[in-house]
Image (spheres, rainbow, N blue to C red):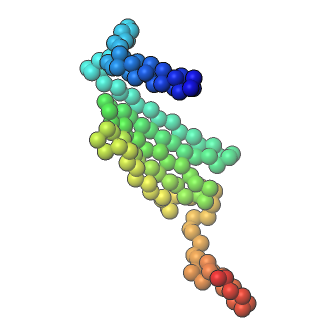
């Protein structure tokens, strides 16, 4: 019986607290909203060209108000250059255009090796066992 009274009391207290504190309390602190006339703006870029390790990459990015536009590129381990052009804003979100330039090659061969379809598939003979 005591358990039922305790549960009923907790429910009454919870309901009364929800009724009493319906509206949020105003919180006043000394933080001013970001002024709209000072739209964020920056330009950023860097480049790495380390012949010893083969690390070659660069990036540049610009922001004007709520739009960020940029590009980065790097030399992949197979020697191809990957370039990514991107744009981000509040209306369209993040959009990227990725390209791989076959013409540029770092420390690798200048042409991609030809791969025939038959060399990619290996035939395994059926030994009479069922997979099902």
**Residue 43 versus residue 103 in the image, above or below:** above
Give the image quarter of residue 23.
Answer: top left
Query: Would you say residue 125 is visible in this rendering?
Result: no
User: Hey, which residue is sitting farthest left in the picture?
Assistant: 37
Quarter of the image for the N terminus: give it. top right
Q: Which residue is drawn at 35% across and 27% down?
A: 41
- Of 121 and 69, the residue lying toward us: 121
Q: Where is residue 28 in the image (x, y as percent from the top left)?
A: 36, 9
Q: In this view, does 31 lie to the left or right of 49?
A: left
Q: Where is residue 69 in the image (x, y as percent from the top left)?
A: 37, 40
Count of marks, rendered view: 0
Q: Where is residue 10 in the image (x, y as percent from the top left)?
A: 49, 22
Query: Would you say residue 131 is visible in this rendering?
Result: yes
- Of 81 and 129, the residue lying toward us: 129
Q: Is residue 127 left or right of residue 75?
A: right
- Of 3 and 48, the residue lying toward us: 3
Q: Which residue is drawn at 43% across and 21% down?
A: 12
- Of 6 and 70, the residue lying toward us: 6
**Residue 50 versus residue 66 in the image, above or below:** below
Give the image quarter of residue 108.
Answer: bottom right
Q: Where is residue 5 in the image (x, y as percent from the top left)?
A: 52, 23
Q: Residue at x 56, y 68 (%)?
A: 111
User: Hey, which residue is sitting farthest front in the picture?
Assistant: 1
């Amino acid at each position: 019986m005591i358990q039922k009274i305790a549960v009923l009391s907790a429910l009454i207290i919870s309901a009364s607290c929800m009724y009493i504190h319906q509206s949020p309390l105003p919180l006043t602190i000394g933080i001013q909203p970001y002024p709209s006339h000072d739209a964020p703006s920056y330009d950023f870029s860097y480049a790495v060209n380390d012949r010893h390790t083969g690390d070659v990459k660069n990036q540049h990015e610009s922001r004007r108000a709520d739009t960020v536009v940029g590009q980065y590129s790097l030399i992949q381990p197979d020697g191809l250059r990957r370039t990514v052009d991107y744009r981000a804003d509040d209306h369209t979100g993040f959009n990227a255009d990725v390209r791989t330039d076959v013409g540029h090659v770092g420390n690798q061969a200048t042409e991609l090796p030809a791969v025939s379809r038959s060399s990619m598939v290996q035939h395994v003979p059926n030994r009479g066992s069922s997979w099902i």
